[in-house]
């Protein structure tokens, strides 16, 4: 049973397309994250699901019912907005109860549900306060409280953590994840932050230019990206890309970089062609034994060192490009140092430079 | 030889403050005096009004001038003004706020409709009073409540729409969207979100709208005869060819000023203060 089914969905603002034909099926209880750079159509898509934007073409079904022309209030959804959308003239209790009052819920039921939501979110002590007397994190809890008291079929989150500082964001992220586990409700969550996407999602839907670039579990997308865009978008620091020539002859597959460096590959497609070679900073190590697959040795002269505590990021030139690698802090001394690094070559990706697709 | 170096008198902070206060007091007296004088005349007996040298204050508070106005039935004109200004303000606020909401949220009429609307407000009343008079004669609306109410409403609507448009634009869209998702209808959102959020603007605009209708003279002069005379027109009846009834003029003017005093006093905090937007990041 799926709670949300989207078929060939389009949205145009005049002649400008924002969403260009999206198909999406969200199973009951799943946490789906729509992620992508700004302007990719993720917020427009969410707003169409909520009924706040008209649909230009295609259908949206919620709980098996086509809702294209159903008003937002009749869609059985709850939504959390980026700016919290709290009413400044109502106290926290009334803010949370606002949606229940719209549905003429009996007073004792309102009391009960608001109290339960407040307990879940640890804001019981704040119920008498006005929004302006709350911190950003508390306001966002109230906004989430307003959504959860509704017992809606579908929860929509529109970049709910973007206005919070980094530490609070981490805290609220865990909170939202915990809520999903407790409530088991289907949730659709929009963010531009790939870390939020990776940590929260059962399934990530990565959007670009109004189309789904790739959809799948976070690990799927991380380990088996379909395109250069997906490979570059997920993961931090981002994947290194080096233009290269791919050669396949009797001795096997290999890539050659502009500076003459050649790396043998454990496998690869037929034929010789120009490619973009992609490797994540995490797939480097000083110890070939620590790598899961075949190791390829490269000589690195450290140009830049960025320690982060237990790990350190180094930048060195390879194939004419500055390459970043993540190592254990004690593995590297400082800039100018020359080291042997091992690359987990089996996890590298080859990308068609023309289409951007992973080969 | 003095050890303390003293600045010239004019540059000492105390002196400057004193000068500022003196100027402020003089200006206040100049502006307040006519109002004071008006109030005083309204309490004076005829002998006191024309006394020379002038009496600066009434010898005792006597309400004879006011009693006269109520006995003659002239005081009804204040009630007329209240009815006309109050009703037209309510209608203009309701219609104007809805129109402004439509302009802002549904982009009704595109970018330029709002400017066109406010341009209607720039018409000088004197330029249209005769066509309006002829029209009203034709409709039989002269000397009626609804005739003036419609006219005041029409004249105030552009102002209300223009002002409310600005206030509504300041309301974060998400507040309304959130309410829509939560289960409220558009009309309920207007009532439960837009009105409370724009409360300051609503009251401020209403005060100005009311005062415009309250102070109107030209429309009321031309379009009323005997039934719906407003206090501004009533006052002019006391200026005679032979003599002016100063006591009545003063008492009627005070009666006409009081409602505006009261309105401004009650609405002062809305006129001055902007509502704090605690809802959105801040």
Image (tube, rainbow, N blue to C red):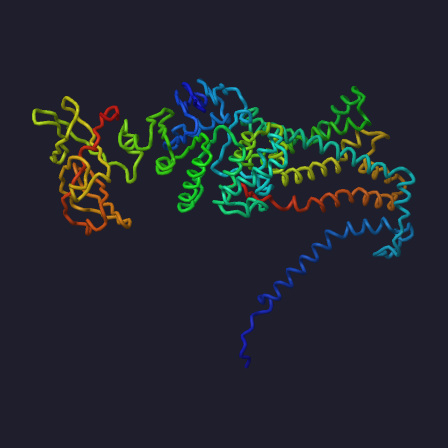
Residue B158 horizontal/vertical position (percent): 65, 30
Residue A114 in the figure: left or right of residue B252: left
Q: Residue at x 76, y 21 (%)?
A: B135
Residue A315 in the figure: left or right of residue B11: left
Query: Residue B115, can we see it?
Result: no
Tell me the quarter of the image containing the N terminus of chain A.
top left
Query: Residue B131, can we see it?
Result: yes
Q: Nearer the viewer, residue B246 or B234?
A: B234
Residue B55 in the figure: left or right of residue A193: right
Q: Nearer the viewer, residue A89 or A327?
A: A327
Task: Name, please, the residue furthest toward the bottom.
Answer: B1
Q: Nearer the viewer, residue B214 or B192?
A: B192
Please say if A81 is above or below A68: below
Please say if A64 is above or below A334: above
Tell me the quarter of the image containing the C terminus of chain A.
top left
Residue B169 horizontal/vertical position (percent): 56, 34
Residue A107 horizontal/vertical position (percent): 63, 36
Q: Quarter of the image holding residue A220?
A: top left
Q: Quarter of the image holding residue A73?
A: top right
Residue B258 in the figure: left or right of residue A36: right
Q: Residue at x 77, y 29 (%)?
A: B148
Q: Nearer the viewer, residue B151 or B272?
A: B272
Residue B40 horizontal/vertical position (percent): 83, 52
Q: Residue at x 40, y 34 (%)?
A: A191
Please say if B60 is above or below A111: below
């Amino acid at each position: 049973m799926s709670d949300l089914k989207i078929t060939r969905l389009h949205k145009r603002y005049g002649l400008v397309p924002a969403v260009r034909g999206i198909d999406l099926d969200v199973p009951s209880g799943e946490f789906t994250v729509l992620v992508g750079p700004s302007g990719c159509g993720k917020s427009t898509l969410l707003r169409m699901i909520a009924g706040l934007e008209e649909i230009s073409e295609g259908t949206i079904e919620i709980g098996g019912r086509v809702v294209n022309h159903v008003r937002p209030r009749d869609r059985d959804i709850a939504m959390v907005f980026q700016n919290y959308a709290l009413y400044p003239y109502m106290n926290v209790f009334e803010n949370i109860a606002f949606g229940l009052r719209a549905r003429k819920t009996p007073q004792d039921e309102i009391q009960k549900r608001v109290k339960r939501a407040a307990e879940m979110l640890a804001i019981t002590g704040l119920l008498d306060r006005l929004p302006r007397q709350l911190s950003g994190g508390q306001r966002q809890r109230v906004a989430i409280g307003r959504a959860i008291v509704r017992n809606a079929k579908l929860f929509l989150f529109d970049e709910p953590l973007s206005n919070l500082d980094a530490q609070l964001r981490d805290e609220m992220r865990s909170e939202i994840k915990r809520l999903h586990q407790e409530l088991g409700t289907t949730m659709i969550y929009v963010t531009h932050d790939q870390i939020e996407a990776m940590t929260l999602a059962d399934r990530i839907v990565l959007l670009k230019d109004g189309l789904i670039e790739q959809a799948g579990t976070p690990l799927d997308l991380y380990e088996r990206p379909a395109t250069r865009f997906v490979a570059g978008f997920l993961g931090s620091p981002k994947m290194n890309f080096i233009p290269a020539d791919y050669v396949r002859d009797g001795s096997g597959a290999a890539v050659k970089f502009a500076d003459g460096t050649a790396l043998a590959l454990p496998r690869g497609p037929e034929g010789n062609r120009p490619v973009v070679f992609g490797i994540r900073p995490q797939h480097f190590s000083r110890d070939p034994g620590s790598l899961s697959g075949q190791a390829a040795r490269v000589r690195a002269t450290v140009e830049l060192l960025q320690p982060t505590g237990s790990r350190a990021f180094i930048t060195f030139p390879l194939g004419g490009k500055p390459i970043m690698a993540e190592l254990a802090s004690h593995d590297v001394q400082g800039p100018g140092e020359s080291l042997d690094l091992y690359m987990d070559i089996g996890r590298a990706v080859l990308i068609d430079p023309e289409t951007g697709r992973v080969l | 030889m003095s050890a303390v170096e003293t600045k010239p008198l004019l540059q000492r902070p105390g002196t400057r403050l004193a000068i500022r206060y003196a100027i402020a007091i003089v200006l206040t007296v100049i502006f307040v005096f006519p109002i004071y004088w008006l109030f005083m005349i309204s309490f004076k007996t005829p002998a006191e009004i024309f006394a020379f040298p002038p009496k600066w204050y009434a010898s005792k508070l006597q309400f004879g001038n006011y009693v006269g106005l109520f006995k003659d039935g002239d005081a009804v004109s204040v009630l007329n003004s209240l009815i006309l200004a109050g009703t037209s303000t309510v209608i203009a606020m309701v219609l104007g706020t809805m129109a402004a909401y439509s302009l802002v949220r549904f982009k009704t009429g595109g970018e330029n409709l709002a400017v066109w609307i406010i341009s209607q407000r720039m018409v000088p009343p004197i330029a249209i009073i005769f066509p309006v008079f002829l029209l009203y004669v034709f409709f039989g609306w002269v000397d009626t409540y609804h005739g003036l109410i419609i006219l005041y409403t029409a004249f105030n609507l552009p102002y209300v729409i223009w002002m409310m448009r600005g206030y509504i634009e300041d309301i974060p869209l998400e507040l309304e969207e959130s309410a829509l998702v939560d289960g409220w209808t558009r009309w309920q959102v207007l009532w439960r979100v837009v009105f409370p959020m724009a409360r300051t603007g609503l009251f401020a605009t209403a005060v100005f709208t009311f005062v415009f209708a309250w102070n109107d003279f030209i429309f009321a002069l031309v379009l009323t005869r005997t039934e719906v005379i407003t206090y501004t027109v009533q006052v002019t009846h006391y200026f005679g060819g032979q003599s002016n009834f100063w006591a009545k003029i003063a008492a009627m003017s005070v009666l006409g000023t009081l409602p505006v005093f009261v309105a401004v006093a009650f609405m002062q905090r809305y006129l001055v203060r902007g509502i704090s937007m605690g809802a959105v990041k801040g």
